Amino acid sequence: MQGDNGLHAFAQMPDIILASRSPVSCNRWKGEEFVIIRIFIILNIFIITGCAGIQTVHTTSNIQVDKSKKYLVFPFRDPSFEGKEFSGVGSRLTNKLVASCAEYGLNMTPIFNEKFQASKDINTLDALAYAKENEANFIITGQVTKWIDRATEWSMKRDFLGLSIFVREVSSGNIVFTLEMQEHSNIFWSGTPDDFVDSLSKAMALKLLSAEK
């Protein structure tokens, strides 16, 4: 009997193979493929959501930027986070934004001296008076709004760099252009806000140029 059972099982093998190729089985595989595709799409959406990116927080413009005019850029205020001040960051961003704008033909000059430093707030009236003495048309001041270096690999936390700038007309003292932008890392591997200085400065230069006359 045991041998007969073995022969019977062997005889049933082709039926098993054919059954695996039946329409019902094919539909099952199609269903599984559909599930796999859905999982793949969801994972891609998750990855895209976690990717690094540059965002415009806000922007306003009352005039068109004129390349023939003279702009003085005063040191952007250094950031602080949880009571710690990050010295030198504002100066780096000031110089980088000036360099990025210069690539597009804007006449910008950074101003650094004992009176105007990134480690302290810029007095707007003093900056306007300095600009008048030097026959400038506009001044640009700003502050680093975010400098967060807290991500480690797979920590699901992000690094941030944010910068806000204000363009004032020297003759009237009125704000004619404002812009705040941020850049952040993704949530899957570590980086530092230093990695964003170049890219954020270039993005802000392009935004400023979008108001070009």
Image (cartoon, rainbow, N blue to C red):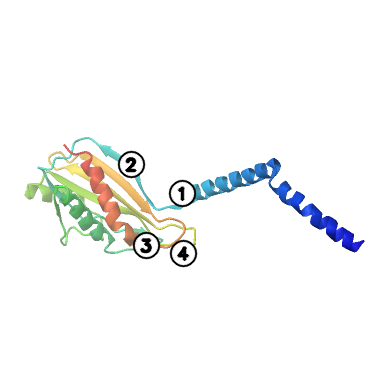
Q: Residues within 10 Å of mark 2 (few under 14, many from 20)?
A: few
Q: Secondary structure at mark 2?
A: strand
Q: CA distance from mark 4 to mark 1?
A: 17 Å
- Nearer the observer, disc 3 or disc 2? 3
| Pointer 2 residue | 58
Upstream in sequence: badge 4 or badge 1: 1
Q: CA distance from mark 4 to mark 2?
A: 30 Å
Q: Residues within 10 Å of mark 4 (few under 14, many from 20)?
A: few
Foreground residue among 46 and 211: 46
Left or right: where does residue 163 sit relative to residue 114? right
Image point (25%, 55%), residue name: 76
In percent of width and height, residue 66 lies at 14, 40
Q: Residues within 10 Å of mark 1 (few under 14, many from 20)?
A: few
| Pointer 1 residue | 49
Image point (84%, 58%), residue name: 7
Upstream in sequence: badge 2 or badge 1: 1
Foreground residue among 156 and 108: 156
| Pointer 4 residue | 153
- Residues at circles 4 and 3 in contact by the CB criterion of under 8 Å: no
Three-letter amino acid code of the residue under disc 1: Thr
Three-letter amino acid code of the residue under disc 2: His
Three-letter amino acid code of the residue under disc 4: Glu
Upstream in sequence: badge 4 or badge 3: 4
Image point (21%, 43%), residue name: 209
Return the mark for residue 192: 3
Which image quadrant: the N terminus? bottom right
Q: CA distance from mark 3 to mark 2?
A: 24 Å
Left or right: where does residue 138 sit relative to residue 59? left
